[in-house]
């Protein structure tokens, strides 16, 4: 099948599986193991993850990024609680209302130009505590990196966790692309998650080379007490869980997470350098992970998409999003930049 | 890793992936394709499934068997509706209340000794239509094969679909092991699903050799209108869907579904023949698919489980369940029967 | 308007408001008070209720009996929990699935000939604890009196509360007609609720002469922590709550609860005596509160209903239910019995 | 009980019941009628409401304003739909997340300085139709009058209904204070609801002199098909419904709705005139119904509240809300204005 036509910058989950992870699946494909996670591959992966995030953490595998986010929130809140998030947060705009459906709660969104929350931005929602007519704010949820490709520093995260504790709230992090943030910050995972005061983390692998497999990591074990029931009831319990475990173990153990994320980030940097110099292109966000946001002339969007698939971010502003992935090549970038340049020239 | 200790008869999803399906995954692992199902592998698989179940059917891939069942029901009902099912139905006892959680509806269960529903058994729930204090019966949900390893004939299914239509209800079939039923009946899929009046089918592959991948098939396309939103909102939308599609295509196109199911059923038959003759063993259900239910002396359960893992079905009756799978060997059966025989001898 | 045609034995909420309670509403109809319960009438009523049920109880007013039940359960469970109840329980058959809708949980029903649960009947549901595929049993819910007009003794209730504690479950009582049970047992409310180990009580007044007004009483205050948010979110928070409070205060303070319930029970006793002696009538339940269940010839049901409205309980058995209320008169009973007798004579 | 201390401008539901409506309740308090709405008083009230809103409308009584709103929305949407509303909408900020809890949907809120929506303000949410990752906009919900005391003209409503139809959406109106809007516009109810393209209306009476009683009115009968089941399942079905019906009939039949609302609006006008002239008071919204919003010096809020209870609207801006009601007197206003003036003088 000719899939070349799909090559582009639409999303990091348009890429396939990294060969090492296909191998991991094959390695685990021997004989019988108990289904639903009580198997040695899953056990192994849990231990590996704990070695990164801390002994005391509790680790669970789920099937999708939406599942990881919704189940994280579900462990922290009741239906009468509110979840504070950026207006651009994945949970707010890209999950078709899954948090409202499963948690029956309200998202309290905050406009944010770079996708980040700050204590000052959050303040408008910090009222009505104890007043039964209002949803009770209970979680601050941030994405790291953000959906705008920006990355929180450890200090920024800590300032939010301090605020959360002060109001008896929790801090959740959507880490669907956590590896890209770690590489960007040049920090180990623990330092800007558990150590920065995050309570629950969605830690994803699919966007960085896995076939499938996301995880939820609790840094306060008591919050995980009922997770297994929620996971099953939410249809997020994989029967052949060994194949998630096998991938996660190799992903972390071999530093594949870093190799892949470093490459994707680097490619985004290259893409930034090649395109930002072109007249008619305005880069709208800092390029800190594997996304580049740009305003380009409206009339070249369609012809450019015809050759390299990507998404329009903001129709009104003529803003587009280009994502790189673990398998983006220098060649991809160069051809793309050349194509863009020639289209710009013709405007 | 030594996984031999897990070899046994606990469940068909304790088995791994069939090699042909690993190959299918590798074949699909090339370049970029659009995520979330708009890719050629998924398109291909949909066409293949339609060639089995009818051109007019609508096909969607999901991630788990629970997901397939809950989303099927969700397409058919509102929260004030009732779903009639056998007391032993997977949706009633093995999904941790997922239907109630996601559909917010009531299951109206019916005791059934062999796991099958009949019009006569259902009758007790067919009242209160139009009465606002009662949930309104709207779906009859059956499992094919049943959780007791028995298989509905086409006529039995048709009698239920006739009843359903008469009361303006729908007929849903949980076909997590549909291939085993088709082999058992020696019928093509369509004849005892679409042609027998089933409205929506959960069609599973994971229990018959797939890595993961379940599907929901609508035989009345208008019922599928909003399925894509429900699937996303329910966290059942796979980003790298191509790998489900790739498996399903090969699974059906190569007749692997039949080969695997025929083998599993045959092994169950052998297991039945080897164990039913042993004094102290009482087989409690007809062996029509890949499950054997038996009452055995209470004191040998634990020692037998230590060597071959399986589940107790009914503690009170000392009844156990043995499942065979696509990779069960004649040797597995023979050693198991021998072990059972020697334990029985020592009683 | 001529409403005589509706006089009958259909339900105790077909009766109107007791004059003393209309007066109570008028008395409270002066000036402004803070809405939503922060008013002196509500405060007063809460104190009065506590004087009956114990200082340490927590009291909340709601709008309907279904609301009281659903919010009671909601305070005790998560969605992955199960609620054990009789098959005939109001929460199971008369609330159109409201518990499933609001609590997203599963009801685990038990057939019971007299509407009562016993430890032996419950046992079948006491398994699967800790097993993520099963809903986790968490509440035993009983109705006092039952929907079959029978009344639990304090000992029977205590045996269920002991069982509940043993399994780390809660005991909920649906006391929509609690006054009728208290009169029947000749006990004060506390002795067979709080003192018998009930954790949460739905305590109703509407079926015994109030205009509207139900309450939820917690005997373990810590369970009430989030009740106010759940009540608001469930649409059960009355804005002009003072009129519920005013009624409840008078209802309890003047012993109206006892007068009304004693009368209704007495009338049921008279109805039993007058009808049970008639050939062709078979009383099917003990008459311990204000309900009489009888099997009568099928052909007289319709003509009898034409003169005195009541409901068929079990079509198949030709069983009917007759409820008495605070305003049933001796004359009502005598005319009814005479009518029944003449219809029977004509069979 | 001395309730004078509560007299003030906090909310129109701090007032009591209009004497004519107490009388209506007493009139209906005769004999037995069928519970749950199948009674002559309810039937009568439905006919009266239809005479105002159109023969073809469908009318249902519920228990609370939140109930009316949530059930209106529930009739129009599935969980994957979005409801567009003003950021200040009652459904968005004053119902503790009841829409999210019961409808499992997402509210798409829009900042609006005067509480009104316009097609231009809504436009930002009109995208993503057909895209499964986004909730699907399905309802525009407006409050008439708005929570800011402003009133939509018929033309403004029509422009929204035209937009709704264009996008295959519905228009819902929260008319908890509809009478105040009708008086303000000097229009009959029908002209700015059904005739202006509203699909479903929450029509309330509690804030204008009723004890309790709200209604949902469908102008497209087919939308009401399943309402009765939703109402029961949502715990909003009153057993003694005759007392809601009796009130609504008198409320409309005697023009009490108009008398009460006209008085409340007039009192708000007087309050505006008396306070807006005071130095240090800035009125922030047009006074078109029975609410006055004002910015006053922060230091006088508490002493003023001590004498006349009212709520702070926006802490940060030192903005307060004063509501008048059917029983506000000229004396109330004059004393309040005098008190305010003397406090201002002391600043």
Image (spheres, coloured by chain):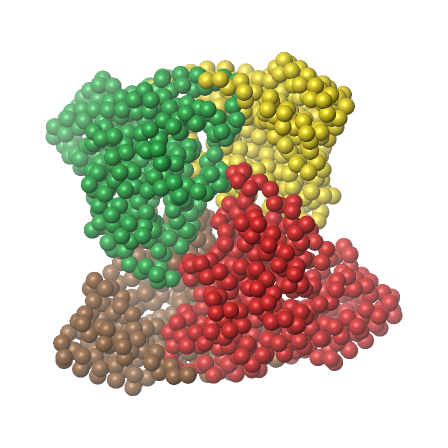
Chain colours: A brown, B red, C yellow, D green
Residue at x-position 26% and y-position 38%: D195
Q: Residue furthest bottom?
A: A331
Q: Is residue B132 visible?
A: yes
Residue at x-position 87% and y-position 70%: B345
* Residue D241 spot, x, y in % from top left: 46, 28
Q: Is residue B270 left or right of residue D285?
A: right
Residue placed most toward the observer, A255 or B205: B205
Residue placed most toward the observer, D282 or B19: B19
Q: Residue furthest front?
A: C346
Tally of marks: 0
Q: Is residue C202 left or right of residue D288?
A: right
* Residue B292 spot, x, y in % from top left: 73, 67
Q: Quadrant of the N terminus of chain A?
A: bottom left
Q: Determine which quarter of the picture holds residue D259.
A: top left
In the depicted structure, whether residue B339 falls above or below residue C3: below
Q: Quadrant of the C terminus of chain A?
A: bottom left
* Residue C53 spot, x, y in % from top left: 58, 27
Residue at x-position 50% and y-position 54%: B76
* Residue A322 spot, x, y in % from top left: 28, 73
Q: Determine which quarter of the picture holds residue C11.
A: top right
Residue placed most toward the observer, D176 or B55: B55
Residue placed most toward the observer, A112 or B117: B117
Q: Is residue B5 visible?
A: no
In the depicted structure, whether residue D302 falls above or below residue A293: above
Residue at x-position 60% and y-position 21%: C307
């Amino acid at each position: 099948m000719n899939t070349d036509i799909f090559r582009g910058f639409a999303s990091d989950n348009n890429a396939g599986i990294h060969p090492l992870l296909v191998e991991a699946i094959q390695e685990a494909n021997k004989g019988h193991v108990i289904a639903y996670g009580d198997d040695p591959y899953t056990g192994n992966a849990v231990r590996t993850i704990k070695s990164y995030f801390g002994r005391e953490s509790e680790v669970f595998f789920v099937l999708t990024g939406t599942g990881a986010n919704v189940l994280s929130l579900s462990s922290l809140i009741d239906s009468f609680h509110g979840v504070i998030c950026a207006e651009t947060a994945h949970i707010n705009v890209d999950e078709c209302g899954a948090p409202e459906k499963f948690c029956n709660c309200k998202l309290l969104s905050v406009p944010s130009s770079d996708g980040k929350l700050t204590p000052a931005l959050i303040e408008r929602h910090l009222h009505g505590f104890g007043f039964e007519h209002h949803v009770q704010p209970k979680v601050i949820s941030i994405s790291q990196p953000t959906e705008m490709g920006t990355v929180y520093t450890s200090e920024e995260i800590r300032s939010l966790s301090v605020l959360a504790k002060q109001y008896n709230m929790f801090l959740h992090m959507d880490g669907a692309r956590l590896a890209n943030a770690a590489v960007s910050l040049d920090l180990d995972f623990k330092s800007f998650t558990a150590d920065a005061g995050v309570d629950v983390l969605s830690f994803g692998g699919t966007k960085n080379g896995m076939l499938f497999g996301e995880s939820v990591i609790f840094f306060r074990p008591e919050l995980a007490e009922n997770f297994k029931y929620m996971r099953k009831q939410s249809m997020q319990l994989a029967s052949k869980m060994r194949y998630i475990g096998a991938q996660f173990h190799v992903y972390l153990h071999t530093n594949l997470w870093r190799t892949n994320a470093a490459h994707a980030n680097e490619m985004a940097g290259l893409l930034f350098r090649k395109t930002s110099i072109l007249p008619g292109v305005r880069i709208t966000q800092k390029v800190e992970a594997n996304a580049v946001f740009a305003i380009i002339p409206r009339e070249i969007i369609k012809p450019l998409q015809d050759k390299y698939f990507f998404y329009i971010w903001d129709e009104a502003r003529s803003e587009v999003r280009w994502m790189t992935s673990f398998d983006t090549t220098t060649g991809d970038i160069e051809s793309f930049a050349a194509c863009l340049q020639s289209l710009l020239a013709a405007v």
